[in-house]
Image (cartoon, rainbow, N blue to C red):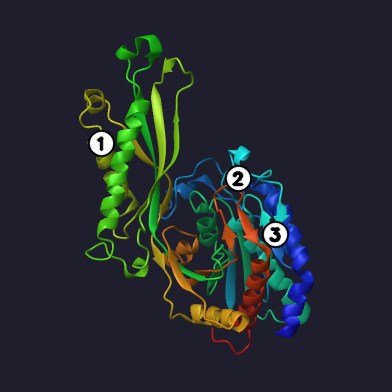
């Protein structure tokens, strides 16, 4: 283990440089190719065979998919494979290359896509979520290759998917294409804890139609923006009702009992109007809704629709022109990995070897692509990754030392997982 740790220390700066190159590629949804090629080049140099499978637009017809935000033409996952074809044991390492936008750059202390190191942290959009995970995975593999030649006795598949931040369709498509294994490790930022599960959630879009006109004659118009406030209030009441009895009753979920408020309704985007002196014709509100496990996406959509209609019920215009509510992205199922599984035990032992302490076993009021491996492909799956801050926010950053600590744990886990004596 000392030789592995020494090899990790020797290559840490190289991993940080790869991370900087990844962050410098602004891989928002639809623009993932540049960053994907950076990773593909590194995996190719590490002896992996590289494929770039595309995604067809009919993935939207899959019952487990989300609603695609745009076409998949010209977009692709990166799948890298290494190890014997007749492997006695296999593993998928998964990550996502897409990042959320950084639109209000004036609030950042530096360009979001210009990586900056400061006080032991690397700042940049996607640095934490989740390009640092790729750096940690590469660092672990490089170190094993250097310190333990011949360590890879099984089949290792490295999947870098697209669109995790909106639908998960990249990972779903990779699994449907046959890129599965005995288990999956997702290198999401978890503060070096083992992430076991996430809630169900959906994205919905609300369209509010008004009656446009000149501001001078606003009394003859209907401003849809004025309905946004009551609609948000209605959605907040829905949020309150979902969380009211989440520890008991039919919707109680023991896996998330320690999260005081698991089902959050987030108003993510409000758009309307094109001129200060004009009453706009339409307002649109994009919403993310976490919901109890027994609700389907369609049932959650209906709950949201009823909450919205109730919020504007006293308005004659909206009684005749009710807002429309449609699914617009995530249709994510709840998932949970049994902590007594071989995968969790093996990874916990690797973490303890590094930290001399048992890892935290946690769930979150959000989701990861681990849900597909567990729910659609019957594979054990966990997430584990570096320590990050301000994820999806201003000055997102990752702690560089935690990338090294993550790599130390991952290397030990890989060595044990692929040891010849390990059970299939």
Query: For the view shown, which residue lies furthest in the bottom direction?
Result: 421
Q: Residue at x 60, y 84 (%)?
A: 353
Which label sits in the foreground, 1 or 2?
Answer: 1
Q: Secondary structure at mark 3?
A: loop
Q: Residue at x 54, y 65 (%)?
A: 190
Instruction: Give coordinates of residue 212: x percent, y percent.
Output: 38, 17
Residue 78 visible in this rendered orientation of the protein: no
Q: Quadrant of residue 419?
A: bottom right
Query: For the view shown, which residue lies furthest in the front direction?
Result: 119
Which label sits in the foreground, 3 or 1?
Answer: 3
Residue 232 visible in this rendered orientation of the protein: yes
Instruction: Bin the neighbour count of mark 2 within 10 Å (Cα to Cα): few under 14, some 14-19, many 20 and up.
Output: many
Residues at badges 1 and 2 in contact (C-beta under 8 Å)?
Answer: no
Give the label on residue 28, or none: 2
Give the label on residue 311, or none: 1
Q: Earlier in the sequence, mark 2 or mark 3?
A: 2
> Marks 3/1: CA distance?
48 Å
Give the label on residue 119, or none: 3
Left of 301 or right of it: where is 413?
right
> Marks 2/3: CA distance?
27 Å
Which label sits in the foreground, 2 or 3?
Answer: 3
Instruction: Work out whether residue 204 or residue 244 is closer to the camera in this orientation and state it.
Output: 244
């Amino acid at each position: 283990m000392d030789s592995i740790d020494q090899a990790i220390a020797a290559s840490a700066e190289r991993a940080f440089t790869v991370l900087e190159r990844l962050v410098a590629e602004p891989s928002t949804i639809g623009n993932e190719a540049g960053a994907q090629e950076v990773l593909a080049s590194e995996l190719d140099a590490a002896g992996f065979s590289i494929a770039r499978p595309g995604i067809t637009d009919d993935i939207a017809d899959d019952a487990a998919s989300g609603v695609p935000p745009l076409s998949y033409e010209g977009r692709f996952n990166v799948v890298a494979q290494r190890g014997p074809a007749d492997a006695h044991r296999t593993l998928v390492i998964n990550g996502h290359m897409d990042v959320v936008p950084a639109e209000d750059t004036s609030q950042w202390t530096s360009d979001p896509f210009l990586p900056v190191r400061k006080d032991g942290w690397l700042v940049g959009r996607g640095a934490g979520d989740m390009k640092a995970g790729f750096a940690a995975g590469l660092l672990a593999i490089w170190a094993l290759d250097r310190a333990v030649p011949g360590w890879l006795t099984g089949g290792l598949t490295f999947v870098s998917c697209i669109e995790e931040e909106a639908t998960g369709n990249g990972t779903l498509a990779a699994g449907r294409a046959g890129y599965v294994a005995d288990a999956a490790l997702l290198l999401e930022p978890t503060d070096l804890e083992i992430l076991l599960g996430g809630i169900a959630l959906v994205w919905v879009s609300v369209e509010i139609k008004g009656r446009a006109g000149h501001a001078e004659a606003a009394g003859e118009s209907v401003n849809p923006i004025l309905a946004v406030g009551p609609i948000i209030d209605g959605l907040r009441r829905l949020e309150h009702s979902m969380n009211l009895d989440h520890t008991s009753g039919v919707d109680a979920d023991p896996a998330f009992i320690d999260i005081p408020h698991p089902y959050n309704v987030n108003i993510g985007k409000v758009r309307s109007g094109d001129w200060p002196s004009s009453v706009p014709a339409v307002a649109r509100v994009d919403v993310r809704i976490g919901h109890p496990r027994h609700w389907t996406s369609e049932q959650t959509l209906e709950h949201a629709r009823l909450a919205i209609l109730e919020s504007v019920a006293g308005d004659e215009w909206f009684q005749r022109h009710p807002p429309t509510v449609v699914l617009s992205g995530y249709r994510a199922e709840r998932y949970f990995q049994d902590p007594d599984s071989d995968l969790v035990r093996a990874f916990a032992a690797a973490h303890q070897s590094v930290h001399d302490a048992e890892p935290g076993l946690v769930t979150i009021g959000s989701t990861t692509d681990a849900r597909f491996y567990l729910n659609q492909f019957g594979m054990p799956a966990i997430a584990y990754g570096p320590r990050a801050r301000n994820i999806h926010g201003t000055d997102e950053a990752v702690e560089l030392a935690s990338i090294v600590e993550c790599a130390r744990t991952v290397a030990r886990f890989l060595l044990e997982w692929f040891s010849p004596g390990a059970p299939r």
